[in-house]
Image (cartoon, grey):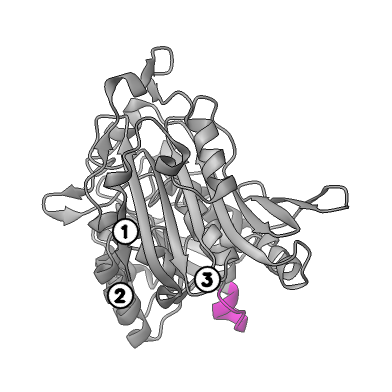
Amino acid sequence: MSSAVPIVLAGARGHGRWHLDNIRRLQDKGIVRPAGICELTPLSEDELPEGLGSPEQSADFGALLDSTGARVAVICTPIPTHTDLALTAARKGVHLLLEKPPAPSYADYRRMADGIAETGVACQIGFQSLGSHAVPAIRTMMAEGAIGEITGVGGAGAWARPESYYRRAPWAGRRRLNGVDVIDGALTNPLAHAVATALALNGSVRADDVTAVETELLRANDIESDDTSCVRVGTAQDRPVVVAATLCAEDPDEPYVVVHGDRGRITFWYTQDRVLLQRAGRGPEESEYGRTDLLENLVEHLVDGTDLLVTPEVTGAFMTVVEAIRLAPDPAPLPAGAWRLLPDEQRRVVPGIDGLVAAAADTLALYSELDAPWADPARTKEVST
């Protein structure tokens, strides 16, 4: 066990529970040793996965990194805290897995990425879908002309969240909190993978790959941020990327990204690592792929120099989209007749939104161009970058 890398997790509740279980999995493989957990309130014994042991617990992240001798930190805390915690770790020489979205603004992202680069520590951003082996496989299909000339990439996410989802934390569903950017919208947090994966498959990963961003941000819930939104990204690759998302789906389904070619299409259900290749004159071909865990990839990078899969620099295009959403007008409330409450599930539903989300990904059009009765084209905000 002595070769196992000592690791500290900051933020062990909510999505952090997934990281706790993953650390436990890698502990069983002898790859990591759970050395510390940073939470404002310590985890009870019941909250610790069986067999994890008794990692040191503290609300002071910096002190915990020092006392545990951590070599890696996983940061899964509220979005506005990401940059400062990442820099705290980096300045202590601790390598990082930073949960997505990496930051709430482009300025914070640059401060984080530049600060980390100066220290020389390794940093992986937690876009797990980019660890899928489907991503290089799809890129190969595209490069080999399987679907002809690529004309654009669409993304669709039709998910559901109850009203309680927005009460789970003070920052949930907020654009700002106490004067600090949060930008917790459908496209920037729960369905951020759809945006990042669509950009990655288009070959648009760095900030200067984005030439313009159009946003349509709306909300059915009584929140600040968007729960039903779409974005069209102009790219240096001269192909549009359009992603449509909602947390108010009638029938929630698996999110996906679709690569359009002039002789076919490739659909990627990124949570399932499942790919469907459809092309002229051939039967559909479906494949499932494996996935490399991003924390495991980070440890392999430290141990034997394996290339990191998701460095801060390859999230630059995603962060440019986040910045456009941050600068856009506050999301417009949908008119009362455009949504209804499902009393059994205590969640708001926008009738017809599932079809609109799919149509946006299919046609690379915005809601207002698809004649959504509640989408006002005058509110479409374009930001040139």
Amino acid type for the residue under numbered disc 1: Glu
Amino acid type for the residue under numbered disc 2: Arg
Query: As displayed, is residue 87 above or below residue 178?
Result: below
- The crowd level at tag 2 (other Cα within 10 Å; few <14, some 14-19, many 20+) is some
Q: Which mark is residue 382?
A: 1
Camera-nearest residue between 240 and 48: 240
Q: Position of residue 369 (x, y in %)?
A: 44, 43
Q: Position of residue 46 (x, y in %)?
A: 43, 36
- In the rendered image, which quarter is residue 100 located in? bottom left
Instruction: Decide if residue 340 is in sight here.
Output: yes
Q: Which residue is mark 3?
A: 238
Q: Is residue 17 magenta?
A: no
Q: Check disc 1 and report its element: helix, strand or loop.
A: strand
Q: Check disc 3 and report its element: helix, strand or loop.
A: loop
Instruction: Return the residue found at the far top.
Output: 343
The residue drawn where x is 50% and y is 24% is 250
In the picture, measured across the screen, residue 145 lies left or right of residue 48, that is right
Whole-angstrom CA distance, mark 1 to mark 2, is: 22 Å
Q: Which residue is mark 2?
A: 110
Query: As displayed, is residue 117 above or below residue 308?
Result: below
Q: Is residue 302 magenta?
A: yes
Query: As displayed, is residue 313 above or below residue 279?
Result: below
Q: Position of residue 32 (x, y in %)?
A: 54, 65
In the picture, measured across the screen, residue 1 lies left or right of residue 102, that is right
First of labels 1, 2 by sequence position: 2
Span highlighted in magenta in the image: 300-308
Q: Check disc 2 and report its element: helix, strand or loop.
A: helix
The residue drawn where x is 57% and y is 48% is 363
- The crowd level at tag 1 (other Cα within 10 Å; few <14, some 14-19, many 20+) is some
Q: Position of residue 272 (x, y in %)?
A: 66, 46
